[in-house]
Amino acid sequence: MSILFEPMKIMHMDLRNRFVRSATYDGCANKNGYVTENQMDLYSVLAEGGVGLIITGITYVHPTGQISSFQNSIVGDEFIHGFKRLTAAVHSRGAKIAVQLFHAGREARFPDSSQSARYKQSLKPTGQCLPNHVPTFTPKISTFNPSISYIP
């Protein structure tokens, strides 16, 4: 029998098998980032189907880090209840669940909402730049170089 079906442990988390549903954007959150019944159904079906670990898709941690509509959010305590319900649904079907925390960086769309204003203060820098130093960032296109071995 394949080891895929054998239980395993990741640190302190016991999994019933080695099947993992990787982090995948499902687009099932509501427009404000809350867990929905569609997500409850989707994750319940995955857990009932025998997946050992489900990793949720991109869950933005700050309003300025949102990249897609209908993406889950965890920017405040008001989102905890939905994730607790989702976790309970998955656990009751024998699977485990983890959240993929996410910020879209320069690819983010910046929502024009009261939620964005509410959390704006947390973006203040904690350090200072050196005198006469202007931080710069120049994006560049990544290119494939066949002379570099990418796989060890």
Image (tube, rainbow, N blue to C red):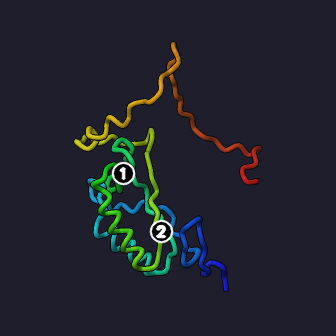
**Measuring 74% from the left and 46% from the top, which residue is drawn there?**
146
Residue 148 pos. (x, y %): 75, 44
> Which residue carries the number 1 mark?
68
Q: Residues within 10 Å of mark 2 (few under 14, many from 20)?
A: many
Residue 51 pos. (x, y %): 50, 76
Left or right: 27 in relation to 20: left
In which quadrant is the N terminus drawn?
bottom right
Q: What amino acid is at disc 1?
A: Ser
Residue 83 pos. (x, y %): 35, 63
Left or right: 80 in relation to 55: left
> Which residue carries the number 2 mark?
54
Give the Cα distance between marks 2 and 1.
Answer: 21 Å
Tell me which corner region of the image, top left, top right, bottom left or bottom right, holds residue 27: bottom left
Query: Of helix, strand and loop, which one carries label 1?
Result: loop
Q: What amino acid is at disc 2?
A: Ile
Whether label 2 touches label 1, CB < 8 Å: no
Extreme residue in the front direction: 12
Image position of 5 with respect to 76: above or below: below
